[in-house]
Amino acid sequence: MLFYTLIEEDDPKTPFVQVYWAYAEHLGAALEKIYFAALKNGFKNPVWREADPTTEDALPDTFHLLNKNEVFWSESRNYFPPEEIIKLPYGVICSGIEGELFINEVKKGFNIYKKENLYCLEVNISDAELAPLYFDILNEYNSFDAFWYTLHDYSGEENINNLFVNEELNNAQKIIAHLNEDFNNGIKNGFCSITSFIKEGETNINISDHKKIVIMTYSLKILDIATKVLIDKGIMNLESLKSIDEGFYHWHFRSPNSLDRADLINKLKSLGFFEWIPDSNISNN
């Protein structure tokens, strides 16, 4: 497949954008090819801003080539005034199709709301800060009752969700060690959500497939602990939190070094995860 990508040189003084195209099996593989091509072309800090599948008809009349026609890029670079724009975490990217909102409306911060008795805390955070912040939150709790992956459909076309649970990952140290061993198939996988579960308050501490931290709990005590972590790190409580999963056309993607869905399921099972059907007993015993 051929993919279009708008890539930005994230320079605080003279940022610019340039269009690249790449052939690849899936979007994540194309983005990686484009990233390294941009580095070879002199980018210092390339950031993907938007991407879409496309066709050869969309290529301009004149362009540059790299790697046996696998990567193409336009001749022009468009410069613009410096503006602070969040770097979305790996695994999700805007489409070039215009939605209801613009990416500069997505701000780093958090928001808390309540659905009946359920507290919901959502956090927008940059790519580099996502995993460290999630780990810092986990470290505030003494123990967990389970950890699971929710695997979504890799094609993005069907509403398929499979949960794979491990009850041996029952403290922050074990969960963090597990995630650090394989970032590509967990935190960086745009077709995967991860959840650390505490029975108290029926608490889910998630990194969603949109790569937001989302905490849902009936316990105000547990909520307050997580909120304090955010405030101590200077993360602002925003009155209105605009995020990639609302008002934007977007794509999910995974690393070319990640496993396909079937192989990831087999790997999780080999690590002691078992498939769990919601509303059934979580224990595998």
Image (cartoon, rainbow, N blue to C red):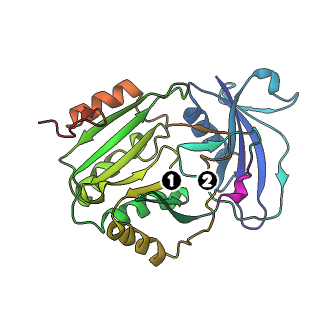
Q: Are marks 1 and 2 in contact (CB under 8 Å)?
A: yes
Residue 42 seen in the figure: no
Query: Where is 184 relative to 161, above or below?
Result: below
Residue segment shown in magenta: 100-106
Residue drawn at x 56%, y 28% is 26
- The front one of 148 and 51 is 148
Crowding around mark 1 (Cα neighbors within 10 Å: few <14, some 14 to 19, many 20+) is many
Q: Considering the numbered disc 2 on the image, is that residue within a helix, a strand or a loop? A: loop
In terms of secondary structure, where does tag 1 sit? loop
Would residue 169 appear left or right of 213 to someone viewing this image?
left
Name the spot of residue 176 as percent of width and height, x first.
30, 55
The relative height of residue 33 versus residue 1 in the rendered view (above or below) is below
Q: Which residue is mark 1?
A: 212
Precedes in sequence: disc 1 or disc 2: 1
As drawn, is 240 to the left or to the right of 91?
right
- The residue sitting at 35% across, 31% down in the picture is 264
135 is higher (above) or lower (below) than 256: below
- Residue 10 falls within the magenta-colored stretch: no
Amino acid under label 1? Lys
Task: Tell me where residue 262 sits by quadrant.
Answer: top left
Q: Quadrant of the C terminus?
A: top left
- The reply, left or right, for residue 117 in relation to residue 31 is left
Q: Which residue is mark 2?
A: 243
